[in-house]
Image (cartoon, grey):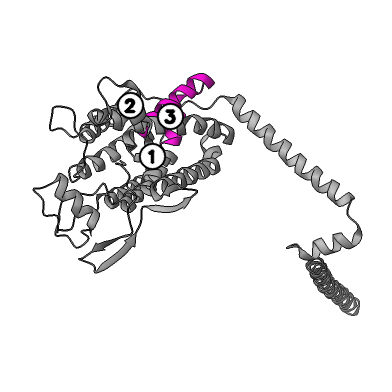
């Protein structure tokens, strides 16, 4: 969750229990008066990494790079819109100006001052997957089970933006990894007067970053071994719901359901846990079967790969045809497989042939020795037969 951004001066963040002290700034750099915050940069890096991993692993799970791209083009904007709307609805009183629709809309769209919620982003991305799957006539469960794995990885990276903003921290603690800063002290004095603003607080952003990273690796294994649809998605709902429920209980900046003392994220976490358990149970009872991506998408991807390979080979042939001998020699000398290596391999081949021929000669020698031995055995047998005949004649 991202609260109102403030251009902080460089501040010191300390972990007294470890004796650590860091100087940070939530602004990474500034160009032409436009400030680029670490929070946004980390989210962009998280999205890019998840996209790269998805493109590399998609074919192993029945998807294609083109489909991944199509889904991402819709998921990214709807996830951002969902994250913003979720936060605005939970903090409606802050953004709504009675009798002034223009000002209200201006407050809602002014995202540079912050206000994003991860649950809203996940719901927005899920809606985008559902919508695109219906348009392309692809099983929703297949795409969800593939894509949901990368959500916790993005969360693990994005949560470090809270560290640079000095937000999303917990209540005070005596644990050695407690965190302190002037920004935290000011927030506690203003919003949590019952807490000692001089004490360290729980770095809940770090708890969630580690927890979601563990979920990412668990989901990789589940996706690989699961035999029923929605299993991977249900496991994410259960695991993240458990982690977020307990971490949210430590937070000092939680969103609450209007008119109640119920934390919105804790209620939603419980709903996700129950929903995940129900989906896995029903899937086992009715023995749901996975539905593959339609064959036409796989064939189209294979054809594109063949076409790309042919174009690459043709391009190489055209290049070689227009290349003179000197350029070719220079290119081969710079390549990993040089002319020297070719000659070395040729020499190795000749030596191996010589070895084989020598082995053949040895075997032939052995064969000739055996023939000589056989001939000598035959002559000895003949001599014995002649001697026996001579003896018989003498006796007669």
Of labels 2 and 3, the one closer to you: 2
Q: How far, Cα to Cα, is label 2 from label 3? A: 23 Å
**Callout 1: SS:** helix
Number of the label disc, if any, that sits on residue 103: 2
Q: In the shown orientation, is residue 122 left or right of residue 341?
A: left
Q: Dividing the picture into quarters, in which one does residue 174 lie?
A: bottom left
Mark 3: secondary structure: helix
Q: From the viewer's perspective, tell me whether residue 206 is left or right of residue 356.
A: left
- Element assignment for label 2: helix
Q: Which residue is mark 1?
A: 112
Is residue 123 rendered magenta in the image?
yes
Instruction: Quickly name the residue at label 3.
Output: 78
Within-10-Å neighbours for mark 3: few <14, some 14–19, many 20+? many
Asked whether residue 35 appears in the rendered view, the answer is yes
344, 202: nearer the viewer: 202
Secondary structure of the magenta portion, mostly?
A: helix
Residues at discs 2 and 3 in contact (Cβ within 8 Å): no
Mark 3–mark 1 distance (CA, rounded to whole Å): 17 Å
Q: Are marks 3 and 1 in contact (CB under 8 Å)?
A: no
Q: Residue at x 57, y 36 (%)?
A: 65
| Up-down relation of residue 57 to residue 110 (above or below) | below
Residue range of the region highlighted in magenta in the rendering: 121-148
Disc 1 to disc 2, C-alpha distance: 16 Å
| Mark closer to the chain start, 1 or 2 | 2
Q: Position of residue 88 (x, y in %)?
A: 29, 30
Residue found 45% across the figure and 31% down from its top: 77
Residue 41: % across, % down: 44, 48
Q: Earlier in the sequence, mark 2 or mark 3?
A: 3
Please, is residue 307 above or below residue 162 in the view? above
- Badge 1 crowding class, 10 Å Cα cut-off, few under 14, some 14 to 19, many 20 or more, is few
Can residue 221 be seen here? The reply is no
Question: Which mark sits nearer the N-terminus, 3 or 1?
Answer: 3
């Amino acid at each position: 969750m991202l609260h109102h951004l403030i251009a902080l001066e460089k501040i010191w963040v300390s972990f007294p229990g470890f004796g650590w002290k860091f100087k940070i700034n939530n602004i990474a750099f500034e160009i032409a008066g436009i400030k680029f915050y670490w929070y946004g940069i980390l989210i962009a890096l998280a999205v890019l990494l998840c996209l790269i991993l998805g493109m590399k692993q998609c074919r192993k799970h029945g998807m294609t790079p083109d489909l991944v791209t199509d889904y991402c083009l819709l998921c990214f904007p709807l996830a951002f819109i969902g994250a913003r709307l979720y936060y605005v609805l939970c903090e409606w009183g802050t953004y709504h100006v009675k009798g002034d629709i223009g000002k209200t809309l201006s407050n809602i769209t002014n995202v540079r001052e912050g206000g994003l919620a991860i649950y809203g982003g996940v719901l927005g991305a899920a809606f985008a997957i559902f919508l695109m799957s219906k348009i392309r006539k692809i099983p929703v469960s297949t795409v969800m089970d593939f894509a949901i794995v990368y959500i916790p990885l993005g969360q693990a990276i994005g949560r470090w933006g809270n560290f640079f903003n000095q937000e999303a921290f917990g209540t005070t603690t005596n644990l050695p990894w407690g965190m302190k800063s002037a920004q935290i002290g000011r927030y506690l004095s203003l919003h949590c007067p019952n807490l000692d603003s001089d004490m360290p607080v729980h770095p809940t952003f770090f708890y969630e970053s580690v927890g979601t990273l563990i979920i990412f690796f668990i989901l990789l294994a589940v996706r690989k071994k699961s035999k029923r649809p929605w299993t991977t998605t249900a496991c994410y709902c259960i695991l993240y719901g458990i982690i977020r429920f307990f971490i949210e209980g430590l937070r000092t900046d939680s969103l609450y359901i209007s008119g109640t003392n119920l934390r919105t994220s804790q209620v939603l976490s419980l709903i996700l846990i129950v929903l995940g358990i129900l989906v896995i149970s029903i899937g086992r009872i009715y023995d749901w079967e996975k539905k593959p991506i339609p064959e036409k998408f796989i064939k189209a991807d294979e054809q594109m790969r063949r076409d790309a390979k042919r174009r690459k080979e043709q391009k190489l042939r055209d290049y070689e045809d227009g290349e003179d001998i000197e350029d070719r020699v220079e290119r081969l000398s710079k390549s990993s497989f040089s002319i020297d290596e070719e000659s070395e391999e040729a020499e190795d081949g000749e030596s191996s042939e010589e070895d084989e021929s020598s082995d053949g000669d040895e075997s032939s020698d052995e064969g000739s020795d055996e023939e000589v031995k056989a001939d000598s055995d035959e002559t000895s047998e003949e001599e014995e037969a002649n001697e026996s005949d001579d003896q018989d004649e003498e006796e007669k």
